[in-house]
Image: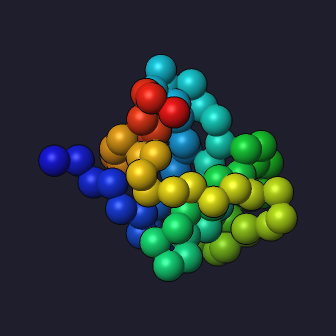
């Protein structure tokens, strides 16, 4: 079974829809909730990869029920959203 629970290690991973289209990046994980930055800049991507939180008011919470799978480099959303 694929991982579906976000952890701090998932910061910086790209978020893709069921077709593999990129929709953002996990900018922060707090209390099991991931926050998606829909348009991360280069500095934001580097900060997230280093584990430095960069969540701001433009980031959206990602409910775990919407996650199909979490791999080594991406968070894939379910098809039926």
Does residue 63 lie above or below 1 as drawn?
below
Which image quadrant for residue 9? bottom left
From where the camera sits, is residue 45 visible? no
Colour setup of the view: rainbow
Q: Residue furthest right?
A: 57
Does residue 27 lie above or below 66 as drawn?
below
Which image quadrant for residue 21? top right
Does residue 30 lie above or below 69 as drawn?
below
Residue shown at 61% from the left, 67% from the top = 28
- Residue 27: x, y in percent? 64, 61
Q: Residue furthest left?
A: 1
In front of the other: 43 or 79: 79
- Residue 54: x, y in percent? 73, 68
Q: Residue furthest bottom?
A: 31
- Residue 16: x, y in percent? 53, 35
In front of the other: 70 or 68: 68
Q: How many marks?
A: 0
Residue shown at 64% from the left, 35% from the top = 23
From where the camera sits, is residue 66 visible? yes
Residue shown at 70% from the left, 56% from the top = 60
- Residue 26: x, y in percent? 59, 55
Residue shown at 36% from the left, 48% from the top = 70
Does residue 78 lie above or below 43 as drawn?
above
């Amino acid at each position: 079974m694929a991982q579906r629970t976000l952890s701090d290690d998932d910061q910086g991973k790209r978020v893709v829809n069921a077709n593999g289209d990129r929709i953002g990046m996990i900018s922060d994980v707090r209390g099991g909730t991931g926050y998606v930055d829909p348009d991360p800049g280069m500095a934001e991507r580097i900060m997230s990869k280093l584990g430095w939180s960069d969540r701001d008011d433009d980031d959206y919470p990602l409910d775990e029920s919407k996650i199909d799978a979490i791999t080594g480099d991406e968070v894939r959303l379910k098809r039926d959203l």
